[in-house]
Amino acid sequence: MTLSEIITAVSAADLEKPAVRCIRLFDLSPDFFALLRQECVDLLRTERPSEVANRSHVTHWTKPRGTVLQFSLLNRTGHFNDTSSDHDMSCLNKRFHAADRYPNLGALISAFPHSINFRMNVLSPGAALSPHREPVCFRARNGEIGLRLRLHLPIVTNAAAEVVLDDQVFVFEEGQIALFNQGCVHSAMNGGGTDRLHLVWDMLLTQKAAQLLFGNEPPPFPAARYSAVEQMLPPKTLKPARGFVGLAPLVGPSGVARAGVIEPQ
């Protein structure tokens, strides 16, 4: 798919039209992933998260069930439980403050330009996020219509940890980075007996971001790109959603039609 085709296929979700659900982008090298995984497990054991079940949490509206934790890795304060700037559509003055303790995690975060957040989400056994949807397109301060692209990287998972995107059930594999269309009605459920840890982050679709995600150059971290024929992950099964909650669109249909690459905000 060309960049223009990807923009159209992803932003179609904001128009409640059939949209691309997920695209596999990178497969991390085993050695790098092993180091990254150990750091994430150490972070889970050591640092203080926010709890999505707390009514004041920025994503409590997704109606979590069970224990759902979030570690905010990219913000202005360095506090892992600071969610205040997670969704402000800005990448300015945000950084990962603990790269000295978690160098491989820091290297991964720094490799993805113009991220507006970077989170480690933890679903305990039996925990879930209810069906919900979020806008892809937004209006930048200069009036341009941009896209917020979401990526998932499973760190610890199991065969019973599922995500559902527009009624299609997917099982993501550890060490694989995928574009995840949050504009689709989506949910997550950990049906396994161990914690599910995913790194999840949102990026502004800038020129640098587009080159990294959809270009042909080797990525600036130890990983291989998926070929075009490998990018589409087949669903495991179907599971129709029974109702969902959603955030209001940020732009109308004419704005979605004009969405494209923007400058960093």
Image (tube, rainbow, N blue to C red):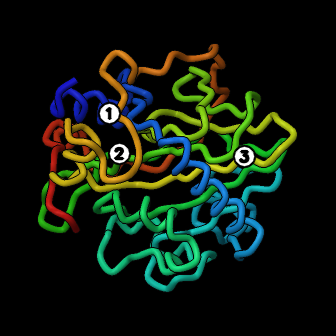
Task: Depth check: give the residue in front, 249 or 103.
Answer: 103
Instruction: Report which residue position mark 1 lands on.
Output: 10
Instruction: Report which residue position mark 3 lands on.
Output: 196
Label 2 crowd bin: few (<14), some (14–19), many (20+), radius 10 Å: many
- In the image, residue 199 sits, relative to residue 110, either above or below, namely above
Which label number is shown at residue 134? none
> Mark 2 or mark 1, which is nearer the start of the sequence?
1
Q: What residue is at 74 percent from the left and 74 percent from the top?
A: 46
Q: Nearer the viewer, mark 3 or mark 1?
A: 3
- In the image, residue 55 sits, relative to residue 146, either above or below, namely below
Task: Depth check: give the residue in front, 254 or 194.
Answer: 194
Instruction: Report which residue position mark 2 lands on.
Output: 136
Q: What residue is at 83 percent from the left and 51 percent from the top?
A: 66
Label 1 crowd bin: few (<14), some (14–19), many (20+), radius 10 Å: many
Q: What residue is at 29 percent from the left and 76 percent from the top?
A: 92
Q: Residue furthest bottom?
A: 77
Q: Nearer the viewer, mark 2 or mark 3?
A: 3
Amino acid on which the number 3 mark rests in the picture: Arg
Label 3 crowd bin: few (<14), some (14–19), many (20+), radius 10 Å: many
Residue 21: image x %, image y %?
43, 28
Residue 80: image x %, image y %?
61, 75
Direction from residue 187 to residue 106 in the image, left or right: left
Amino acid on which the number 2 mark rests in the picture: Val
Picture quadrant of residue 240 = top right
Helix, strand or loop under label 2 = loop
> Mark 3 or mark 2, which is nearer the start of the sequence?
2
Tags 1 and 2 touching, CB below 8 Å: yes
